Amino acid sequence: MNVSAESHAFSAAEQQAVYRAIYERRDMRHFSGGVVADEVLQRLLSAAHHAPSVGFMQPWRFIRVRSQPLRAALHALIEQERVLTAQALGEREDEFMKLKVQGVLDAAEVLVVALPPGREQHIFGRRTLPEMDLASAACAIQNLWLAARAEGLGMGWVSIFCPLQLAQLLQMPEGSKPIAVLCLGPVPAFYDQPMLQAEKWAHRAPLADMVFEDCWAMPAVPHE
């Protein structure tokens, strides 16, 4: 029996809401304090926890950083790496240093996402691609990001830190690895375009440059 996609599709309004969350999601750097209600945070974490994962390994762990002294220490680690990253950029050092990372101090919530120890035990889907644990955790982060946008909350993903130092700071077990510091909470406004694009740091590449057909670099040809 042939079943069309339309029979399983969301309503037009529901589809529009999904696409709106995708297109209006932004990597936020400006927060306005406030709070995230516990029930909202649980909804967001549940959305993250329902992400797909290779071999159903669910390789995500979330550490909610509530201590202000711990946040300050986390911010110091990020600032340390921000300076080193700027120096590594050479002629763009001054330009990069203008991009502040204050969300760790200003956001209502800070979540550290980490890969757990023992990931090597999961062979299904990872024998030749062990990095699929990271890919799966990234799906959880994206779920959380889109759900946050739907809830009217901003989120920023900070990756400027030394994983070893952050793991030590948060007393993480050997074999675990922090992959993201997520700043989450109310924002003054959502950027109308990605901040790095607005700052002329980079721009979104044309989709046509990213899609091939049959072989690498063979442009996809529209089918009539």
Image: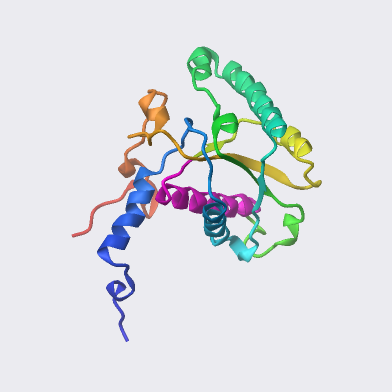
Viewer-nearest residue: 114 or 71 = 71
Viewer-proximal residue, 188 or 133? 188
Colour scheme employed for the rendering of this structure: rainbow
Which part of the image, by quadrant, shows the C terminus?
bottom left
Residue 198 sits in which quadrant?
Answer: top left
125 shown above or below 113 = below
Horizontally, residue 214 falls left or right of residue 60, namely left
Residue 177 location, x and y as percent?
A: 71, 44
Residue 87 % position (x, y): 60, 16
Image quarter (top left, top right, bottom left or bottom right) of the N terminus: bottom left
Instruction: Give residue 220's position: percent from left, percent from top.
Output: 30, 50
Q: Is the magenta stretch mostly helix, strand or loop?
A: helix
Tell me if I can see residue 211 in this picture. Answer: no
View extreme (left): residue? 224
Estimate the x, y position of residue 156 in percent, counting from the top left: 51, 37
Residue at 46 percent across and 37 percent down: it is: 27
Residue 79, located in which quarter of the rendered image?
A: top right
Whether residue 102 can be seen here:
yes
- Residue at horizontal 42%, vertical 39%? 26
Q: Is residue 137 magenta?
A: yes
Q: State the extent of the magenta-drawn residues as a range.
A: 130-154
Q: Is residue 182 above or below residue 6?
A: above
Report the residue that reaches farthest toward the bottom: 1
Observer-nearest residue: 94 or 10?
10
Task: Report if residue 103 lies within the magenta region.
Answer: no
